[in-house]
Structures are given as structure tokens and as C-alpha cells.
Amino acid sequence: MKIRVRADLVYRFDPPTDAIYKIQVAHWPGQSILEERLTTHPTVDFNESRDEEFGARTLRAHLSGEVALTYEALVENGTLKGLPPVTIQHDWNDLPAEVLPYLNASRYCPSDQFGRFAERTFGGTVGGDRVLKILDWIKAEIDYEAGVSDTETTAARTFIDRAGVCRDFTHMGITLCRASGIPARAVSAYAHQLSPPDFHAIFEVWLSNGWWLVDPTGLAPVEGLVRIACGRDAADIAFLTTQGSCRLVRQSVTAEAV
Amino acid sequence: MKIRVRADLVYRFDPPTDAIYKIQVAHWPGQSILEERLTTHPTVDFNESRDEEFGARTLRAHLSGEVALTYEALVENGTLKGLPPVTIQHDWNDLPAEVLPYLNASRYCPSDQFGRFAERTFGGTVGGDRVLKILDWIKAEIDYEAGVSDTETTAARTFIDRAGVCRDFTHMGITLCRASGIPARAVSAYAHQLSPPDFHAIFEVWLSNGWWLVDPTGLAPVEGLVRIACGRDAADIAFLTTQGSCRLVRQSVTAEAV
Amino acid sequence: MKIRVRADLVYRFDPPTDAIYKIQVAHWPGQSILEERLTTHPTVDFNESRDEEFGARTLRAHLSGEVALTYEALVENGTLKGLPPVTIQHDWNDLPAEVLPYLNASRYCPSDQFGRFAERTFGGTVGGDRVLKILDWIKAEIDYEAGVSDTETTAARTFIDRAGVCRDFTHMGITLCRASGIPARAVSAYAHQLSPPDFHAIFEVWLSNGWWLVDPTGLAPVEGLVRIACGRDAADIAFLTTQGSCRLVRQSVTAEAV
Amino acid sequence: MKIRVRADLVYRFDPPTDAIYKIQVAHWPGQSILEERLTTHPTVDFNESRDEEFGARTLRAHLSGEVALTYEALVENGTLKGLPPVTIQHDWNDLPAEVLPYLNASRYCPSDQFGRFAERTFGGTVGGDRVLKILDWIKAEIDYEAGVSDTETTAARTFIDRAGVCRDFTHMGITLCRASGIPARAVSAYAHQLSPPDFHAIFEVWLSNGWWLVDPTGLAPVEGLVRIACGRDAADIAFLTTQGSCRLVRQSVTAEAV
């Protein structure tokens, strides 16, 4: 699917601070960037780097005052792997070594605390069936509602609050998958047909020797996703990280099939 | 320094469960394994893997009943890099891309919450001086005492408890360094002269374009450390991780210069 | 019902510390103490006080070394009010002023966080029906298992852990009732037929202008309970509170119908 | 001191919900209400009650839509007891029974976790000297800053955040006093010369057989305080509690010496 994405981010950095943006489309197998353009006002001389594992790109600079950044790209996002009907959950023994870290608890996903809940609630199912049961549980038990969570909200808290946004749904899903012995990792994306349009957070599970994308909010079709970054949880994939504080002036994000 | 290390671990896995050991000496530049031997009773057919980034080795198997594992190695651990007298703290801009994840908050190191404390308490210093101030603060403010913390204790809790063991000291140090804009990561090790002898947890900071080892407990000389694993925090470097529960029967760990 | 209760508590107070025992049978309407005897070794000159609201008695002393305390009583515990089949949940407007504090969140019962969960899960029922739905949920969802929780465990954590002991069940029940707008408070008791015998924790809800006892564990019949103390949660009804630390040497508690 | 106080509270209750206001001047020894007036728009038929222990008054009603409430009073607040220069800290043994609950941990004051910190930091002092050391520590270590905390913030979190408002300062002070064996409780008040004017939260400690007021923020003179309510922490003294949610439209609070 050809998708045109655009992000307009205006933030105020006062006092000046080191900042990291992760907003560019990833270099990822099956996903091709046909055109892209990055403009800032005032001009910023970014240090752009790219990680080996995920093809995620990072823009870094020391910023001060109000900085407006516009990123546009035209992307062929290929054929994304949604969860197939039949999948195998691997014993830990049979996982590639590089997948193992995604079994571990992380800042927002304290999966070490959810073993009993996962076994009580989803016990008797494994693999893709288990993931589907987890997604069904999230759909039934968590309300999509802005304003309940913030940037510090963990899956433990969302489990109590029973509400959150895409980030929280993703943390809840990752937590329950890892607690079920299934490697899971967070993905940030542009999402066609997401309403209201914004950066989207989804996750991937490792089954049948591959990573498969799932959207625990059910708000955007997997085929319309354009990958940006990937990591253990929101701590790794935030679209903007600053050492000091910064202030949102305005922001808009769009993704349209063309 | 030539060091002979040995770990005897007897655990009971009942019901059977997938288990991951990280107890072997790492393949790491400057560290040579002269001899090593792994024996188990009963015989276990481990899947041994090795991660690219750290040379850390992982033994995996599905275990049941009581399993006794003995690992012995003779190691030349080379010349370990303790913190040099003068170091530079890099702007985020100037960090290698692969170092960036070690700025992020992790399961046991919620560095995102400690920015103000770090600035109030250690403000005005940067780089190695800041790390030394952090180590001094830990030494002055945290008691080394077993029984206060457990495997779920985060640095936020240790900050309140004011007591813990090497794992907690390491999480506290990592948290305060990351909150200070300094990349930091956890290392597990065998430690010559550690008393009582056990697996040791320490950490590394990225300054002057390199990783430098520091021991926040001050219990073992850096030169006598033999690296095992490395990661974001204890979630990544635990010497034994199991999907279900397991029970300690007995355990001893030794490291002796020869 | 006539019930003979006995508690043997041997603790070590080293260094010496202020201590508060709440182990004596309460002076409570309908409950009569026919005989009682308190002995200690060595002799302790306790300050005994009695609170107005609950008739709960408190033994205080500065203790040092090993102290063995034996308390025995023969009690006619009257007819305890289990939840009647039909009850009214009062509007806050219609609650006696002295009942209002039992709507508030407390140390182990963060009911302020559970409003949405309570409404989603138990919505559509009020009063005794709601309390019964809460008890059913606890029975279905929480395992009675020692060793999962400790003295710091809150209902928020038990909600995640899905396991605990009578104290945790009581905190979970109080939390969900308060989150449902129903005043609830913790009660400590001797319990006939509790197995294994120990101090018991239960709770009371305010409905139809009265307090009604419920046992969320279902482990002991309400009719066989002998009240000791009452309060907001375990922070108020602990059988032993000390300013410094103390160490259990041995303890046994019994309650037998005669 | 004669003080004129006034609170204008406009909130929106939609959907309708039970609400409790605690905004009226307390009936308290030494404090006389010379005039007072309560008006609402639209007219609300409040259930007014008054608790025995604190003389605090509670206004309850089921509210819907936008409700504007204005409370005015002219008060002679008497001579408030600030901390005297020399005070005695009582052994637990010597405390009145009704003071004991104020030693216990509460929702926002987890004093059970701060024993070691209190002893390490304030050890060697007792009584009023200890309270003064605690107040000095708070002044030196916590920034008065709005926007860092919210209604769920506990003293454990403020201890990490190192910033908050009067409510957080009060929770921090209560927590450290209780952890030091000194009974402490929260007080809400109108405060002459508080800038910006608002409801104020302060606390009281029990020393030398009496309760003494302290203002951990140092923002308002103790002599200019007019008591409203009192309790274990903010859960007990909130000026507005609702079963469902409500929304602030506007609010102003003033207190002027006349």
C-alpha cells in the first residue's frame, strides 16, 4: 500500500536541551521510502543515525527556543505480517538468542508480576490462540480513553485503571504476552485510518519463527501501518525524548493511502 | 590477573519449566578463558547461545526435578577499565547510536523520575566527577544489608529504603547516571575478594568514548572482576531466569586469583 | 456461641523498642468476656487502654529481649450479623457522619484507583447484591496462598498478584466496596474452625443502617468470630506493632467452641 | 486575630453524583465563628454534619449540573499553638489512646517505609528538635512547584520527585514524623497571607501532651490559620470529594485579617 505520511511538531525547548526525535520512516524489509523530506524552522543541523537491528532512525540535536519540524514521506509499506491463523509458540530453548531480551520485564511492562494472572486467565491456550485471547481480554476490559494515563503509566497501573490510549494498550499486551512466555516488543508507526490521527503504538509477538504485528486497540488496520521505531516499550520508541523539559506548542500527524 | 571461578547451583524445578542460566564467563575483549568445564547432574542437554553485543553466553533447557550445575573456569581477565581521573561527558548528539538505549529508563531503573533529584544533588558536575559524586552519595546514604530488598525491588524503592545488596546499589547508580544524561548499563561478574563470595552486580558508564566499570558497593576491586553478562538492569543479567517458579536448594560461588 | 480463645506469642525485641499488642477480645455489644487471663514471661507492666469507638484494647510497653505473652479468654460472642438477604445501600447523604471515613482510601486500600473497575465489573448492582458480587469475584479470582504477599502488600498489588492471605482478601474487599460507594472497615478476630488456626482478618460493610461482617476468604463461619480490633485496614488492626524491628520466635493462636 | 475568609467554588457535576464539601470553619476550641454565610446557585439542600473529634463540618448533597457555592465567615481564630521551643516526645506508652492512630501509615503517608531514612537522617534528635530537623530537611530538599504532583501523589513519590505543593509538603512531614515515632495528622485551613491564596494544608504533631501546628511550606504564618478539617491525610480533609467525577469551572479562596 502506498501511504503518504506527515508529522508537524512544534515544541519549545527553554532552557535549551538535548533532544532525540524518532519520527522518520524505518528502513525495514518490505517497506520502501519513495520520497521523504525533513524541514525545520529555524534550521537545525541534526545528527541522524540509524540502528542496525530495527532500521529505526534517530535525529539528535541540542535545541533551544521554539522549533518547528515537518517530516513528510511517501512510503510503499509492503505486505505487513498480521497474526496468521495458526502459529507455534516456541519453547525458550528454540528462540533465537536475539529474541530473548523481549521476554524480559521492562520499564512500562512489569511482566514478572503477571505470571499468575496470565495463567489463570489465558491458561490452556498457547501461541497465536493465547495472543488472540489476550487481545480479546484487552478489548473487553480496557476502555480507550485519553486523559486517564500519562507518560509514566505502566501496564500495572493500566491493569487497575482499565483505561488508556494506544501506548497503554500496547504495554498491557506486551506485558501479558511476556508473562505467557511469548516474546513481545513495542513498535511506533504512522497509521492509515487512525482516528483521531496521531503517532500510533502497537506491538509484535514472536511466534512460528517470526515477528507478527498486532494492534491491541483495533483502531487501525495492520496493512496501513508504516513502521518508525521498535524496542522494549515506550521508553525506546518515544517520538521525542529530551534531557530537560520541553513544551508542546502544536502537533499534527497524518497518514493517507494514495 | 588469572582468576579461577566456580559456581555450584542446585535448584529444584517442580513443575518442570523452561530455564535460562547466565553464568558462563563472557567472551569479551581483553578477557580470555584458559579452561572451562560445565557439568550437571542429571545430564542436561543445554542449548548454548552467545549474544553478539556482549559475548554473554546463555544456557537454556527445559528442566525438571532437582538439577545440580557446576561451572568452573580459569580466566585471564586482562586489564579492566576503572574510571580514569579525567573524563568527558558527551552530549547526546555525540553518542554512538548503540549507546542510546542505555539512557532509557528500564524495569528496575526508573531514571525518568530522578531528573530533579540528580540536578539538585549532583548539579554543577559532569562526566566522571558526576559519577564519583553519585558513588559517594550511594556510599553515604545506602546501607549494604541483605534482607531488605527482593527480586522486585526497583531503584525507586531502594532510594526510600536506604538499604540493599549489590543489585540494588547497581540499580541506584544506573538510575542516577541515566537521570544525569550519562549512559549506564548493568554487568554481572565473578568477583575476586568479594565477601561473602557470590555473583556480583556492578555497572558501566559511557564517558570519553568508552565504557568504564564502577562498583557502587566498593566491595570488590574492579581489577578482580570477571564479566558474565551485560544489559539494561537485573532483568537482563539474572544468573537464572525461569518461566515458572523454581526453588533454591543450595548455591555457592567463588572467585580466586591464582 | 461460647468460644475459648488463646494466643501464645513469643517475640524477640532486640534492640529494645516500644510495642503495641492488639490481641485482647474487644468490649463490643453482644460479645461478653466470661473469663480472661494475660500472662507474660518475663513480667511486663503493660499500659492497657481501650478505644471508645470499637471497644478494642491495646497493650503497650517498652520491651526488650525475648518476651512470651499468653492470652486466654472464654467468650460468649453473641449473634454476629452476617450480611442479610436484602439490604439498602445508602446515599452518602444518609450516612451517619462517623461512617464517612470508611469511604476514604487508606494505606492498603487505594479505593480511589478502583472506581472504573468496580463500575465495569459490578455495575448495575447496589447494596448487599454488590457486596456479594464482590465476594464472588474475590473467590473466583484470588488464590488463598501464603508467601505471595507481605506486610507491605496493598490491594492494588493483590489485584495484580491474584493471591494472598486473609489480610489481602480483606484489603481487596474493602477497596472494591469503598470504590463502589459502600463504607467498609477491617476487623481482626479469633475464628473458630479457621484452618490453619491464626488471627483472622475480615471486614464490615455499612448497609441498611448497620455494619455487617463478611469473610472474603470464606474460611471461617461468621458466627464463630470473636472480635479483637477494628479500623481502616491492617495498619490499624495489626496484632503487634513496634517502633523498631522485632523477631518472631514462635506463635500459636486457637479458637474452640465449647 | 480576626480573619475574614471566603471560598467561591464552581464545579460541574455531570453525570450527577454524591458530593461532600469540607470548607466550613471548624468548631474548635479557641476559634470562634463571628458570622458565616453559605449560598449556592442553584439552591442545594445540604445535609450538614459535624464530627465529634475535630468539630469539622461536612456538607453533603447529590449534585447535578453546574453548582456555584459561596462560603463566607468572619472568624476570631484565637491563639494558635505553634511549636514551642522545648517539647517532650512521649514514649508510645504515654500517649493517649486516641492519639495512637496518628502513628499509623495512611494512604498518602507510607511512614512504614521511612524508618531507616528517618533514623539515618534525623537520628540523635527527638521531640520538637526532630520535628524542626524534619522541617529544615523539607525546606532544603523539596521545591514548592505546582504541576509536579496530582491528587494521587504519595509522600513516597514526593520524596523522589523533590517537588510538590502544600498537600505534598504536609504528607512528607507527616510521613517523616510518624516514621520517627511522633504522632502527626493533616489539617486543612484558610491561611491569611498565603500567596497565591488557596485552601492550605498543614499538619499537627503530638508533643508535650498537645497537638502543635506546623506549616512545612513556611508559606503562611501559623497565627493566621483558620482550621477547617483534620484527619490522617488528604483522603480525610479534601475540600471536595465526589463519588463520580466532577469538573472545576472556577474557584477562588481568600483569607484577610480585619
Image (spheres, coloured by chain):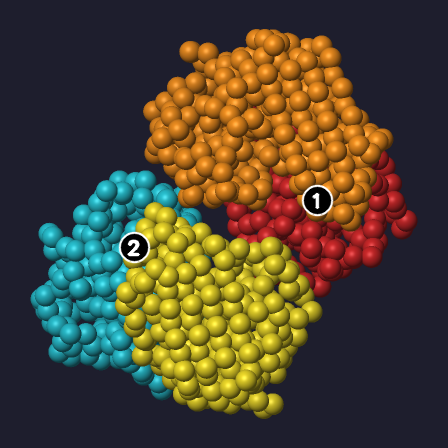
Chain colours: A yellow, B cyan, C red, D orange
| Residue at horizontal 56 percent and vertical 12 percent from the top | D80
Vertical arrangement, residue D104 with respect to residue C252, above or below: above
- Write down the quadrant of residue A9 in the picture: bottom left
Chain letter of disc 1 in the image: D
**Mark 1 and mark 2 on one chain:** no
Image quadrant holding the N terminus of chain D, namely top right
| Visible residue check, residue D224 | yes
Is residue A95 rendered to the left or right of residue C49?
A: left
Is residue D62 rendered to the left or right of residue B257?
A: right
In the image, residue D249 lies at what x, y percent?
68, 40
Under mark 1, the amino acid is: Cys
- Crowd around label 1: few <14 · some 14–19 · many ≥20 (10 Å): many
Q: Nearer the viewer, residue A112 or D93?
A: A112
In the image, residue B111 lies at what x, y percent?
37, 54
In the image, residue D115 lies at what x, y percent?
43, 36
Is residue B98 rendered to the left or right of residue A6?
A: left
| Visible residue check, residue B255 | no
- Write down the quadrant of residue B226 in the picture: bottom left
Chain letter of disc 2 in the image: B
Do the residues bearing badges 1 and 2 touch, measured as CB atoms within 8 Å? no
- Crowd around label 2: few <14 · some 14–19 · many ≥20 (10 Å): many
Quick one: which residue is furthest to the right in this view?
Answer: C86
Label 2: element kind: loop
| Residue at horizontal 62 percent and vertical 46 percent from the top | C110
* Residue behind mark 2: B181
| Residue at horizontal 79 percent and vertical 51 percent from the top | C131
Under mark 2, the amino acid is: Gly
Q: Which of C90 and A123 is in front in this view?
A: C90
Label 1: element kind: loop
* Residue behind mark 1: D246
